[in-house]
Image (cartoon, rainbow, N blue to C red):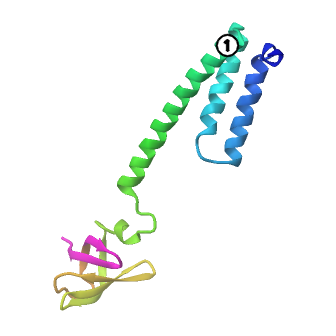
Amino acid sequence: MDGFLTFGPWTWLVIGMVLIALEAMLPGIFFIWLGIAALLTGVIDWAFGWSWQVNLVVFAMLALLACLTGWLITRRKDEDYANGATLNRRSVALVGREFLLDRAIISGQGRIRVGDSVWGVTGPELPAGAKVRVTQADGARLTVEPAE
């Protein structure tokens, strides 16, 4: 129990820095929130000089609040990512964009050039050079319609 008698603000600040450093080594967006809570507990302990028991309660409340805040922040970013994620799905990123036909669409099949890539398209018969809009992506096959 003697160790707790010297459990002061510097201890909380060191614990906070160690937790933040641990986050840098083991990323997972969890230790940083505990580190922030420990740093804030150290500042509060320095300002008010409460007993170690009160500081533990303060740390527990701040850790809960910090972890909840972190969860809300990352959840919002996860939702944004899920709603508009096109990573490794380049064809989905092309939906809504307009291109010129590289090869005429004959019997429902044609090609467009996107940068240095050629994509197979499906759509109504159109001559080469016609402007088309991508309306749907199914794997590496795009569905197009005439752009107006």
Please identify the quadrant where the C terminus is shown. bottom left
Q: Residue at x 27, y 87 (%)?
A: 110
Q: Position of residue 39 (x, y in %)?
A: 68, 25
Q: Main secondary structure of the magenta part?
A: strand
Q: Is residue 61 left or right of residue 110?
A: right
Q: Residue at x 72, y 8 (%)?
A: 49
- For residue 47, above or below residue 23: above
Q: Position of residue 48 (x, y in %)?
A: 68, 7
Q: Is residue 107 left or right of residue 129?
A: left
Q: Residue at x 82, y 19 (%)?
A: 3
- For residue 78, above or below residue 52: below
Q: Is residue 4 left or right of residue 57?
A: right
Residue 18: which quarter of the image?
A: top right
Query: In this rendering, does residue 128 appear at all?
Result: no
- Does residue 92 belong to the magenta stretch? no
Instruction: Kindly give the residue lying farthest to the front in the view shown.
Output: 1
Q: Is residue 2 left or right of residue 137?
A: right
Query: In this rendering, does residue 115 appear at all?
Result: yes
- What span is in magenta? 134-148
Look at label 1 and name its amino acid.
Gln
Q: Residue at x 69, y 18 (%)?
A: 43
Q: How many C-alpha atoms fall within 10 Å of the one at disc 1: few (<14), some, or many (≥20)?
A: few
Q: Secondary structure at mark 1?
A: helix
For disc 1, the marked residue is 53
Q: Position of residue 78 (x, y in %)?
A: 43, 48
- For residue 89, above or below residue 79: below
